[in-house]
Image (cartoon, rainbow, N blue to C red):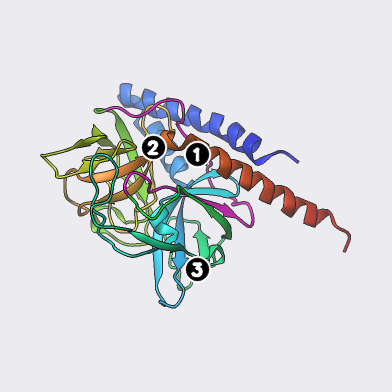
Amino acid sequence: MHSVRAIAAKVAMAMLAVGSVIASGCAHQQSAADVQRALTHASTGVVAVATSHDGEGSVTLCSGTVVAPNLVLTARHCVSNAITTMPSCDADGRSHNGAHLGDDADPSHIAIYVGDHVQIDRDVPQAHATKTLHPVGHVLCDADVAYVVLDKPLTGVAILPLKMHATVETGEEIVPVGFGGGTENIIGERRSRPRSTILAVGPTADDATGAVLGPREFEVDTATCRGDSGGPAIDIRTGEVVGVVSRGGSCVARGNHVYTRVDAYTRLSSLAFTAAEREARANFALLQQPK
């Protein structure tokens, strides 16, 4: 059996080729159709993450990125129970309004949906979580990232590579994708925007937009609607995922759309891939048992 990490690496190389198409498309207008096809394919690796919260009867719909057949990258606030929906942070990554999160949601109450449009009241999830991994603590500032290990591999989706070797820089362009429905904010509809510019990289405070960024965060000019939380920022030059939607302004506001950098959490990523590989091996062993 091929390992989760090996499969993800193989598919990631293919996605880097997609990134080269995106980059060449930027330079050559005649490649616009190729660019759109590449982006459309990459967006299939963005899935809906629906979390049911114990005792509340409510479901949080977020976005996530498939980074291995049974591993999804998303935001921490999508898989933990919220104490406040309005985190206040400073440029050191500290909270100004106490804890933001309570206990983690029960992994079995986290469902993954695949497709361009998701209706969780009638659609059948393709997988459920068995485990979540995230930074320690109960504060979202500078740490709003999580991995979800699944009970089965996802099919019919792209597996997107993570940019772990370098951070983002101001002025670079990314493609945001999520289930916020774009500027119409049609929750449950997956949309990608053509491109978004990185306005600032933390630690900093952006006086023009009001965004306050910790050392592991960056701000883009457009992207985050309700439902986009946890969705990826895809580097337009390489096709790699560079960040996860954490918090932001309205769908139409320019700026104050904050992402958590994936390269700032290399150890967490390593632990997540290891956990996903163990889950895959355990499931494979069960399938080999005589009936």
Q: Earlier in the sequence, mark 1 or mark 2?
A: 1
Q: Give amino acid for label 1.
A: Leu
Confirm whether residue 122 shows in the render: yes
Q: Residue 123: which numbered mark, if any?
A: 3
Classify 268 as above or below 226. Answer: above
Q: Which residues are magenta?
A: 141-169
Mark 1 and 2 residues: CB-CB less than 8 Å, in contact? yes
- Secondary structure beneath label 3: loop
Q: Is residue 168 magenta?
A: yes
Q: Give amino acid for label 3.
A: Asp
Using the image as rendered, state which of residue 64 and residue 215 is in the foreground: 215
CA gap, disc 3 and disc 1: 24 Å
What residue is drawn where x is 31% and y is 35%? 215
Question: For the view shown, which residue lies furthest in the right direction?
Answer: 290
**Quadrant location of the N terminus?**
top right
What residue is drawn where x is 44% and y is 29%? 19
